[in-house]
Image (cartoon, rainbow, N blue to C red):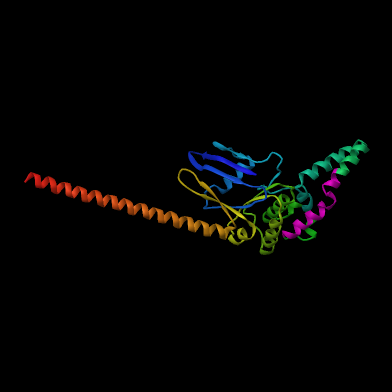
């Protein structure tokens, strides 16, 4: 599981997060919502280790593999499908070791590495990478096209495909539907619904969140740092629960205000009686 244990973060004299205390269990598909500037992307940066909390800790299992979409656009002239295959770092590592074993004519090592590749289902990797490319709108011819020949938006799709290719336990996606057309968005929805790891997803598309997520982590921006609340259900469920919560809070506030008004009225009556009593005594 992924755990935020009383996490607070400050930057440039500003409080970004305050006492975030949330647990996301393995296998959950969790949407992250909140107003712009509430700390959604900051939360993902903490998970990736790019930022470090001023207070509290962010914990995840040490054996979890994390995947996220690189923001840098590749300048590689390698074929697009090879860039996608790079997302499977475990596969690439074994392939590199196999090249070394071949160079040294180490037959035993080669046999052991081939066994690892069999266990990893490596022989289907290229077809899996091709399916990712096609799902995100690339043509068959695009598979062999140099990555640096694509536009910025299409290279971001390549980065997304690379992240999906990773054998991840935890997948972080920040606005993944940007640069995607409707067909690619629908394909991505289906892919994410079948994803077996833990997903944390930032998206402004409510329908997309509705169809993908089963939990919502809402960040409420405040002057002293955003607070986090976890809700069970998809985005529509979150909206209903949130509306009911706000209604209860409003009712409680109104009740408290009535009590304050009653106390004030009582005090005013008491003061008025005391004033009249003093006036009567003075006469």
Residue 19 painted magenta: no
Residue 280 sits above or below residue 151 on the image: above
Residue 16 sits above or below residue 183 on the image: above
- The residue at the point 82 percent across, 53 percent down is 126
Picture coordinates of residue 222, whole percent (x, y): 46, 47
- The residue at the point 68 percent across, 62 percent down is 186
Q: In this view of the protein, can residue 69 be seen by the observer?
A: no
Picture coordinates of residue 105, whole percent (x, y): 93, 37
Q: Residue furthest bottom?
A: 183
On screen, residue 240 versus residue 91, left or right, reads: left
On screen, residue 168 versus residue 119, left or right, reads: left
Quadrant of the image occupied by residue 223: top left
- The residue at the point 72 percent across, 55 percent down is 150
Provide the residue span drawn in magenta: 116-136
> Along the line of sight, which residue is nearer the eye, 22 or 86?
22
Picture coordinates of residue 202, whole percent (x, y): 60, 52
Q: In this view of the protein, can residue 26 be seen by the observer?
A: yes
Q: How many numbered marks have been drawn onto this rendered protein structure? A: 0
Residue 120 painted magenta: yes
Q: Residue furthest left?
A: 283
Picture coordinates of residue 4, whole percent (x, y): 58, 42
On screen, residue 3 versus residue 162, left or right, reads: left
Quarter holding the N terminus? top right
Magenta region, main secondary structure: helix
On screen, residue 11 versus residue 250, left or right, reads: right
């Amino acid at each position: 599981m992924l755990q935020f244990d009383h996490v607070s973060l400050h930057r440039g004299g500003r409080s970004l997060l305050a006492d975030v205390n949330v647990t996301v269990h393995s296998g959950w598909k969790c949407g992250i919502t909140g107003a712009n500037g509430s700390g959604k992307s900051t939360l993902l940066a903490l998970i990736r280790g790019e930022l470090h909390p001023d207070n509290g800790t962010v914990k995840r299992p040490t054996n979890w593999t994390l995947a996220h979409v690189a923001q840098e656009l590749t300048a590689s002239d390698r074929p697009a499908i090879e860039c996608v295959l790079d997302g499977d770092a475990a596969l690439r590592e074994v392939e590199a070791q196999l090249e070394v074993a071949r160079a040294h004519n180490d037959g035993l090592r080669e046999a052991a590495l081939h066994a690892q590749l069999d266990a990893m289902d490596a022989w289907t990797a290229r077809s899996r990478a091709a399916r990712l490319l096609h799902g995100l709108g690339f043509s068959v011819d695009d598979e062999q096209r140099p990555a640096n020949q694509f536009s910025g938006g299409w290279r971001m799709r390549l980065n997304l495909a690379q992240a999906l290719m990773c054998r991840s336990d935890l997948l972080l996606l920040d606005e993944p539907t940007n640069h995607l057309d409707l067909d690619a968005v629908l394909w991505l929805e289906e892919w994410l619904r079948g994803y077996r790891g833990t997903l944390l997803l930032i998206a402004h598309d409510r329908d997309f969140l509705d169809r993908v997520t089963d939990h919502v982590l809402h960040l409420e921006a405040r002057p002293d740092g955003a607070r986090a609340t976890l809700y069970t259900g998809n985005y529509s469920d979150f909206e209903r629960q949130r509306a009911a919560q706000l209604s209860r809070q409003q009712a409680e506030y109104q009740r408290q205000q009535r009590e304050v008004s009653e106390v004030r009225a009582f005090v005013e009556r008491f003061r008025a009686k005391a004033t009249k009593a003093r006036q009567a005594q003075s006469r």
